[in-house]
Image: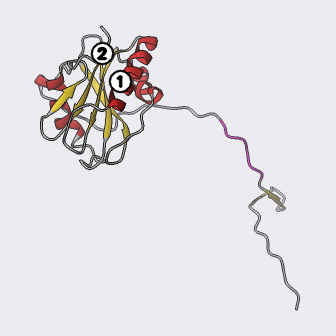
């Protein structure tokens, strides 16, 4: 019994009707555009987000309403501020798991550079409800401060949000260099 070998070839028709096998083209450069994902109307009291209490209120108002937000996972958000410390917006940088998330200065400062932010406030939640900073939180904060110094984008604070309005400010706890 003869066996036939079948081979599927992606092909494009030529003008004369003959078929030419497709070859993989090298990737071409693309034009990128930054767009706002959604409006986040804020009361006048949240116009400035330079204090931990206001940052926590901003979190409870805007981040908890994000379509991907779940209180069972860690979320890392960067609040973008202009030179007058007025909120320009925020960006969700990373969604982690129950007790860990992955964050790198490249992703943290990408949106700040694109948006032309003069300063940022780092924020993330602890699903356990305990907003006390871990050693990893402190290390990440110091790495972000150093990266911000190189880029001339000030890291004003890193606020860790627990349940409700409980929070800890790493600046208030003395973990920022003076």
* The C terminus lies in quadrant: top left
x, y percent for residue 144: 39, 22
Where does label 2 land, which residue? Answer: 176
Q: Main secondary structure of the magenta part?
A: loop
Judge left or right: residue 175 versus residue 55.
right
Q: Can you name the residue that lies furthest to the top here?
A: 178
Residue 114, quarter of picture: top left
x, y percent for residue 55: 19, 26
Determine the secondary structure under disc 1: helix
* CB under 8 Å between discs 2 and 1: yes
Residue 166, quarter of picture: top left
Q: Which residue is drawn at 41% across and 28% down?
A: 108
Along the line of sight, the residue nearer the viewer: 133 or 15? 133
Where does label 1 land, which residue? Answer: 141
Q: Does the magenta portion include 109?
A: no
Q: Is residue 69 above or below residue 62?
A: below
Q: Earlier in the sequence, mark 2 or mark 1?
A: 1
Residue 133, quarter of picture: top left
Q: Is residue 9 above or below residue 169?
A: below
Judge left or right: residue 83 versus residue 162.
right
Along the line of sight, the residue nearer the viewer: 107 or 96? 96
Judge left or right: residue 140 versus residue 157.
right
Q: In this view, does 117 lie above or below 103?
A: above
x, y percent for residue 37: 34, 38
Q: How crowded is mark 1: few (under 14 residues within 10 Å), some or many (20 or more)?
A: many
Q: Spatial distance from mark 2 to mark 1, Cα to Cα?
A: 8 Å
x, y percent for residue 15: 81, 55
Q: How crowded is mark 2: few (under 14 residues within 10 Å), some or many (20 or more)?
A: some
Determine the secondary structure under disc 2: loop
Q: In this view, does 166 lie above or below 128?
A: above
The residue stretch that appears in magenta: 23-28
Instruction: Report how many numbered discs are placed on residues in the image.
Output: 2
């Amino acid at each position: 019994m003869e066996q036939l070998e079948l081979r599927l070839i992606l092909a494009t028709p030529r003008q004369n009707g003959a078929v030419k096998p497709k070859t993989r083209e090298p990737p071409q450069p693309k034009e990128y555009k930054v767009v706002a994902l959604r409006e986040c109307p804020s009361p006048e009291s949240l116009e400035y987000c330079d204090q931990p209490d206001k940052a926590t209120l901003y979190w409870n108002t805007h981040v908890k309403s994000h379509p991907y937000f779940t209180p069972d996972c860690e979320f890392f958000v960067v609040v973008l501020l202009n030179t007058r410390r007025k909120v320009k917006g925020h960006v969700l940088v990373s969604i982690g798991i129950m007790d860990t998330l992955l964050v790198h200065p490249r992703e943290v400062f990408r949106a700040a550079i694109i948006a032309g932010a003069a300063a940022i406030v780092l924020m993330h939640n602890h699903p356990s409800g305990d907003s006390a900073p871990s050693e990893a939180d402190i290390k990440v904060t110091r790495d972000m401060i150093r990266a911000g110094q190189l880029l001339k984008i000030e890291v004003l604070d890193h606020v860790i949000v627990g349940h409700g309005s409980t929070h800890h400010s790493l600046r208030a706890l003395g973990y920022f260099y003076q």
